[in-house]
Amino acid sequence: MKKIIVASITIALSIIIVNVINGQVPVEINKKEFKISKDGFREAMNAIKYGDNYYASGSAGGYRLALTQYLKAYEYNQNNPELNYKIGACYLYSTDKSKALGFLKKAYNAKPGVASDIYYLLGWGYHINCEFDEAINYYRKYKNETIESGGKKSKKSTGPIIDVDKKIRECETGKNLISNPIRVFIDNLGPAVNSKFPDYAPVISTDESVLIFTSRRDGSTGGEIDPNDLMPYEDLYISYNEDKKGWTQAINMRSLNTEVHDASVGLSPDGQILFTYKGVPDGTLFESFLKGDNWSKPREVSTINTKYHETSASISFDGKYLYFVSNRPKDDFGTPSFGGLDIFVSEKQKNGKWGPAKNVGAPINTKYDEEGVFIHPDGVTMYFSSKREGSMGGYDIFYSENDGAGNWKEPVNIGYPVNTPDDDVFFVVAGNARYAYYSSDREGGYGLQDIYRITFLGPEKLMVMGTEDILIASSTETIEQKVKHETVEVKKVRLTVMKGTVTDALSGQPIEATIEVIDNEKNELIATFSSNAKTGKYLVSLPSGKNYGIAVKADGYLFYSENFDIPEATGYQEVTKDVVLSKVGVGSKIVLKNIFFDFGKATLRETSFPELDRLVSLLNAYPNMTIEIGGHTDNVGSLKFNTDLSESRAKAVVDYLIDKGISKTRLSYKGYAYLQPIASNDTEEGRQQNRRVEFKVISIK
Amino acid sequence: MKKGLILFITLVSAIFVLGQENETEQIIIPLKIGFEGQAAIADTSSTLVVAEDQEANLAFNDGVEFYSRGDYQSAINSFNRAIQVDPDMFKAYYGRATTYMQLKDFDSAVKDLLKYQSKYPENAEVLYLLGYSYYYLNKFDDANKYLTMANQKGHKDVNLYYFLGVMNFKNANYNDAIEYFNEAIKIDPNHYFSYNDRGSAFRMIESYDNAISDYNKATELNPKSSLLYNNLGSAKRLKKDYDGALTAYDEALKLDKNNYMALNNKGIVLYEKGQYDEAIQTFREVIKLKKDYPYAYNNMGLCYYKKKEYDSAIEAYSTAINMNPDYAQAYIHRGSAKEMKRDFVGACADWQKAKELGHPLAEEYLGVCTEYKK
């Protein structure tokens, strides 16, 4: 049993456990008062006995089990105040919280002193149902008459100490948020994904083609039932939506699942690295890599886990930073934590291991819990859940933007109806930031928690009534009311997602290639990705505002290079680029797209060096290979001029290679001017493609 | 120039004209003209044959007489005869011009005034009348030019200040306009045109309390004008005094049940108060008064949108767009209604159209449209 409780890691639920242990008030059902007739009395009392046992466990699962028993007794006697109170409490402490209020009201009306915390639970019940004024009323009563009166009015005991003022502030926030709802569509992902069991914690690839989530549906690995709540253990499930026509039937990720709880917490933007969570031994993060169509066996995320709880994790678009949640008391630099769960970040070291964890600090972390971190592939926006000030109840989803200098701005509540008075955790956002995924047990689903897709419609578009008045009494000329066009702040995602497949030029077979993304200006390797061995698919996130060089390399192949200039103002776009790699062989050639010359000259710019260095390594890898560098131009200008220019540019490349130690005898060069165009010279785009340097294999001994 | 022979005629006539069709009222500013007859022989009843050179003077005097009686067509005939006899009789051109002005034939008036002005370029009053005439010909640059010249020549007239105020208003110099209206009101504290227009200038600079106070004064001075009550209502509406606005619009409609602008405005107030059904009903009544009024359809669309009846909203916006294909804001609205129906492709097409029509926010709305461009 102990093991099982530890393993109960549904994070949303484990949170509740903490609440309950502090919160429970002893309430006994008086047998005599309960008896209304002989028929069924014994069965009802039995149900209460079992129910009380579960109730005493103080876990969410326990409350759920207690609830089924209590509801049996309720069939027998619907008016007993204590039973109504307990049913209400069970709902509040587990799922279906909104159902609690009716039972609690009934309990209170029949017997105002039914329990010392009845005001608090009533407040909570109203709060959950968004009846904020009533909620505040009961919270105040609890504060004034129960806590502060020292239980004088309630002879049994003083109610538990609860920060009622915080609850009241949450209600005030709730009133504000609900009167200014954000415009969203919230759509159930449908029966291919959702089941009548809890389905939650969705994670997606940034192009929304892959969805992995946690479910407690039948058929879980090992086939066992969690005796804690009589539901199947958590397993990971996966579904695809490649062609955007709908999600495929979710399938159990057998190779990752174990007979206990396995929960999804994070997926890299390209869908190749999955982070999972296990409650054993002490709240631990695992990672798994997609190789072909196989996920590697989950291994503990190196150097991140501690004896404390590590829960959610999210990796940055370049794979360099891992954001995660932990309740450790201080970070690896000795900075004490803010309290409860905090968000930490770790940078990848040269050796591939995660470096020391650093608390991301204020204003992200607070003395309250922060959970469910998600770092958007735009590189600057962090989404997370928190019970901080500014929440409308329980966990709310917030976002914060980084100013680029490493400072996080004051987090903003994402708003109602995404946030509710209940816990709202695990929120992931697609690359275009128009869509997000989360789980909710809202009405109209397939049962318990379901996974939903949110479409953000943004602020209301300007609405202007058409009106005119004759403002000048001496004319019939009408004057329209001038409208001030106030722009509202619209969050713009500045991100380009480049995706496609890498295949062999001859066979068309997918290739597992390495994709290097280089900041051309800084001559810096930004990130390394790989294409999937089985499908050849790759996905690269490129935040706007840089000139990127992209090099696709695979053993035995000539590399492919691409240049992307993405100005700062470029909004979200997806670029599909299928890459075809040629095997190293006589006659094979590649266009070197990341070689840059000064205008009209043969002077190599420094931004060309990474590409040239790739060429150097290729030549070093094939020491017997001889090559020709060919210079090509567009058709602007005379043949003579272009022949000279293309030849001197080819020579400049050869000179660089010689300078890097490649034998002169292996290198030749030629200027082709505009005689071998690869695109039309009629468009600027075509001319740009024609201005190029090519590399051709002459011989390999 | 003998004193006794000087004719000084002052005509004050406020004419309220209901325009063609069911257009809203136009109020012509009362024209106050004094003009002088120059040393004419007074003996108009004499049957003696007068000297040749008296012929023109006699005709002129007849013109003045007819003018003073309000028989403008006869006055024109007399002035014509005077000019026929003596084409250099400039005062006859002047007399005829003022008569044309009474007949609202401002084109002809301007020709005569320019003729007179070529002889007497320093005459401030003629400059003023030229400004006045050009104003009613909607030639505001010319109007402004002559009115400014008249002002520089020291012409003092309530209407001169008033028109200068109007000119500044039209050029969006609202504070200067207010200064001129102040001058006009100083000369004539009952000049309700100046109160109305000063109220409008205050409205434009969002000084709604001042606007309301001026419109109130204007309606006190002229309680029969629907237009003034409509303006009062609009100032109150902009101040979000919706009940006050409704009262004013109702008064405007009582005075002129065909004032579709006031009725449309009333619908807007009902919309602002969240009474969407009543607002829709009101816009339908507006359409009965003026059936091709795109604003009413647009506004009805907004009511349906608020009621989440997106199909009806789209239909109403489409009607507005059919009536005015350049109605950029209606495209924005229709796009929003389509968005709520998840017709993102349609929404983006509408926002694109709004962008082409120069709507300043359309570009921003198109930000989400990349995935719908196929």
Image: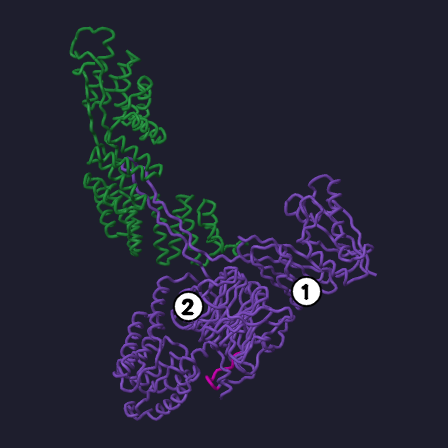
* Labelled disc at residue A419: 2
Point out the tag, 2 or 1, that comes first from the N-terminus.
2
Viewer-proximal residue among B276 and A396: A396
**Which of the image's four quarters has the N terminus of chain B?**
top left
Quick check: B356 left or right of B5?
Answer: right
Quick check: B158 left or right of B305?
Answer: left
Q: Which chain is green?
A: B
* Labelled disc at residue A513: 1
Q: Quadrant of residue A333?
A: bottom right
Q: Chain of mark 2?
A: A
Q: Is residue A583 visible?
A: yes
Residue A435 drawn at (x, y percent)? 49, 63
Q: Is residue A188 visible?
A: no
**Which amino acid lies under the numbered mark 2 shown in the image of this protein?**
Asn
**Which amino acid lies under the numbered mark 1 shown in the image of this protein?**
Ala
Q: Which residues are magenta?
A: A227-234
Residue A229 counted in the magenta span:
yes
Q: Which chain is purple?
A: A
Q: Callout 2: 10 Å neighbours few (<14), some, many (20+)?
A: many
Q: Secondary structure at mark 1?
A: loop
